[in-house]
Structures are given as structure tokens and as C-alpha cells.
Image: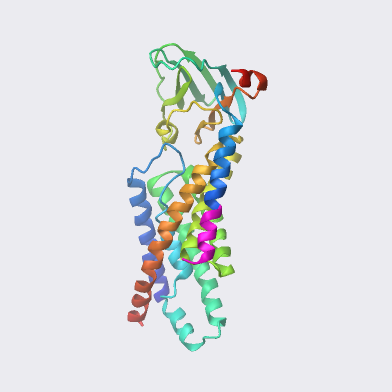
Amino acid sequence: MRRTVELGFLLALALILSYVESLIPFSFGIPGIKLGLPNLIVLLLLYDTSGVENILAEHEDRSGVAKEKAFSRGAREALMVNALRIVLSGFLFSNLYTILYALSGAAFSFLAMLMGKKCGRFSMIGVSVLGGVFHNIGQMIVAMLVVETFAVSYYAPFLIVAGTATGALLGIAGMELVPYLHKMGRKGK
Amino acid sequence: MTRADAALIGVFLLAAAVLAVWFAFGSKEGRTLRISYDGEVIVTEALDANVRSKSSPVYYLFLFEESGTTWERFETYPEIPDGVPYNLLSVSGSEVSMEAADCRDQICVRHRPVSAGGESIICLPHRLVVEMAGGTDEAPLDGMVK
């Protein structure tokens, strides 16, 4: 029950970030480039160990089994919060079209981050960069399918660079935030 | 930041650079304006690359009516009918930009003007693609001589 409240809190936070992002006139004349602030929440959830159950599990068992369990739960929660965030913010701030693109980008991004994290070689920055780049590539592929043209691929270099830059920034922000989330979780316990 | 992170960022930046160079060499000059709707080419116009003046733009008005999509070419700024989804494209010399559209996201309108080959303006809600095709597409020799 407590976790539900925490997730609701994070969902609200992600929605606010969506809104803030929709307010920032962040345009380079190239469509699809944005900061991706809400992805910070997804990233944190992937890494989140602030949930009471996670911390308990971590204390009880350091063999890695509990950690693995906590991880797949984190992934599930991240997916859930992000899907809800996209649908809600889509209806609040934009339209059905945007929801379609956002969902496809999010799916690519999420899978990339999940695999990046699972392979264990990347820090939060690397995982976030993977998420940023694959979000943009995923949206580009869907755009290609919708308008049935390869003309969209012209944007690929810009989108890759933008995804790398914003991903790295969010990764750094995420790394700074994790200790605070830890603290918050412990206090609640 | 781990070494894998740095390597990953490096790989992405390198891939972007390679793609950018490849696109830049692939098509030098945009000589042909190609507009397609829903994947089908509906307009092709050869542009005069030497004319760069903005004094006399021509306009293409696309109307997405329920009965079908129509387009018309205008020498002056056209009057846009009420209540019909539309895109208005302006072409001045070899520079093409989306003048106005009633789509909600306005991404195509905010898009910077395009002129080089391979560049495009895309209005996703209306499934309209405006492409600058390289003059090298049809006549490779001609492109080199020029």
C-alpha cells in the first residue's frame, strides 16, 4: 500500500515534468528534439531502491537474489508509471497522435535502458544515454512508417546527438538524486 | 561514469558524424521539390537554385477535405478556406518553408526553411512530406558538371 502511494507520487512528478517540458520553447527547427525530463522518473524507478520492501530485501539478503527481484519489480513499476504518464499527459497537454509517438519512443527507450542496465557495464549515465538515443530512433522509425518515406532518416544524426546529450544530462541528474531517494526511503521505514 | 559509458557516447557521436557526412555527400544540392501525401508523390517541381530572392514566393495550398486531398499553386498569398484542414507551403527561389498549417503541434511550421538535398519538412498529423530531392537523383552527370 505504501508503495502505491510512492508510485502515485512519482507519477504526479512525472506529469509535472511533462507539463514543464511542454512549456519550454525548446526548438532547434528540427522536430523530435526535446529534453525528455519525464524520463528521469523512469530512470530513477529502474534504479530505485527507496521502496521499503526493496530496502528490507536488501538488508535481509545480500546474495543478489533479492536484488534481482527488486530490479525486475523496479522495471515493472517504471513501465507502469511511464505508460500512465504518457496517456495522462497526452490527454492533458496534447492529442492522440502525440500519444502514439510518445508510446513508441518510450517502448524503444525502455527496452534499451533495461538491456543496458541488465548487462551491468553501464552507469546511470550510459543507461540514460541509451534511453535518449533509442527514444529518438524509435520515434523516427514510427514516423517513417506513418508517412511512408525515408526522408525522415535525414534527421538521424541530429537525433542521435541530441539523444546522447540529453541522456547524459539526465543520467547525471539521476545519479545526484538517487542518494536522496535512499534517504527518503529509510526515513519512511 | 564508467569506461563503458564513455565508449557508448563515443560510438553514438561517431555514428552521428558518419551519417551526417554520408548524407552531406549523398546529395549536394536540392534541385527538385517533391511533395508526397500518404506515401504517394503528388507534386514534383524543379527549383531554380540560382534564385535566392524572397521577393516573389509561390505558394502551394493543400486542403485535406473528407472527399479527398487537393492542392493548388498560387503566385500570391492565397485565401485559406475556413474549417478545412490545410498546409500552406511557400517556395522562394530554392528555399522552401511551411508558411502555415492548422495542425495542432505546429512542428512543420516552426521547422527551419529547407533548401539542401535530402532535407525535408514533415507534417505528421496530415501525413504530408515535403522533400528536397537532390538534383543528382535523375541526372548524376549533370550534377557533377554544374
User: Is there any visible trace of residue A87 in the rendered image?
Assistant: no
Q: Is residue B6 magenta?
A: yes
User: Is there any visible trace of residue B24 in the rendered image?
Assistant: yes
- In the rendered image, the residue lying farthest to the bottom is A60
Q: Is residue A142 above or below residue B41?
A: below
| Residue drawn at (52%, 15%) of the image | B48
| Residue drawn at (46%, 39%) of the image | A31
Task: Pick whichever, B14 or B72, lies toward us.
Answer: B14
| Residue drawn at (47%, 28%) of the image | B114
Looking at the rendering, in which quadrant would you find the N terminus of chain A?
A: bottom left
The colour scheme of the drawn protein is rainbow
* x and y percentages locating residue A28 in the rendered image: 40, 39
Looking at the rendering, in which quadrant would you find the C terminus of chain A?
A: bottom left
How many discs mark residues in the rendered view? 0
* x and y percentages locating residue A161 in the rendered image: 48, 48
Which residues are drawn in magenta?
A: B1-11
Q: Is residue B131 above or below residue B13?
A: above
Q: Is residue A94 above or below residue A108?
A: above
Q: Is residue A15 magenta?
A: no
Overall secondary structure of the magenta section: helix
* x and y percentages locating residue B141 in the rendered image: 67, 20
* x and y percentages locating residue B122 in the rendered image: 51, 33
- In the rendered image, the residue lying farthest to the front is B145
